[in-house]
Each structure stands twice: as C-alpha cells, then as structure tokens.
Amino acid sequence: MDDKDIIKLIENTLKIKMKINPNYIRYTYYELRVKYNLSEENTDRFLILIRTKLENQGYSVFFTGAKFEYNNAKITVQDNELMIAIKEMEK
C-alpha cells in the first residue's frame, strides 16, 4: 500500500469518526491491523500521516501508553489503542 492509498483510508475513516465525535478520535489495533489489514509498516505510516493531519487541525495526538487529561479525567492510551486525538478547546 502506498501513501496515496493510506491517505485515502485516513480521509474515509476520519470522516466517519468526526461525524460521531469531532472532539475525540480513536484508532485501535484491531481497526487498523485486522479490519483494514494494514501491515506493521503501513500502520506506522498511517499513524505518522494522520498525526500530522490532526495536529494541523488543532488536535493533541497521543499514542499507546501516553497519559493525558480529558473532561477532567486522567486517561492512559491502552495497549489495544494505537492513537487518540483530542480537539484542543479554545480558552
């Protein structure tokens, strides 16, 4: 799979996730590796590309094991979660 195909997958999945909750985007291991059948290399590339896209749109992006606060709760990105992105709220 080349970057063009990965970008298309990002666009399609992100559109769906943003309709559900535009402030909280989550990608799991199952979703990327099993459902979309991405290799480890393609999964890494997917995460690099989506991180750039989401950070440019004002999201904070966290990967497996990272800790952050969201809605006054302390959250750790779990082992089965590859990425969580939180929309940074205007203060």
Image (cartoon, helix red, strand yellow):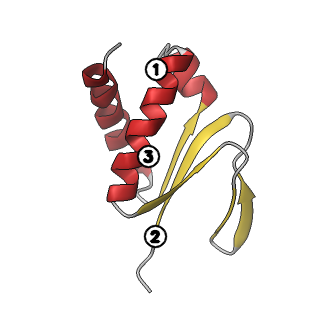
User: Where residue 17 appears, x then y in whole percent?
Assistant: 42, 44
Which quadrant: the C terminus? bottom left
Q: Quadrant of residue 81?
A: top right
Vertical side of 60 occupied by 41: above or below:
above
Q: Cα distance, mark 2 to mark 1?
A: 27 Å
Q: Return the residue at label 3.
A: 51
Amino acid, disc 1: Asn
7 relative position to 91: left or right: left
User: Where residue 24 appears, x then y in whole percent?
Assistant: 50, 56
Q: Secondary structure at mark 2?
A: loop
User: Where residue 73 appears, x then y in whole percent?
Assistant: 72, 69
| Front label number (2 vs 3) | 3
Q: Residue furthest bottom?
A: 91
Q: Return the residue at label 1.
A: 42
CA neighbours of label 3 inside 10 A, class few (<14), some (14 to 19), many (20+):
many
Question: Which one is earlier in the sequence, the residue at label 2 or at label 1?
Answer: 1
Q: Nearer the viewer, residue 88 or 15?
A: 88
Q: Return the residue at label 2.
A: 88
80 relative position to 9: left or right: right
Q: Quadrant of residue 67?
A: bottom right
Amino acid, disc 3: Arg
**Residue, x 44% and y 38% (percent of image)?**
48
Question: Which one is earlier in the sequence, the residue at label 2 or at label 3?
Answer: 3
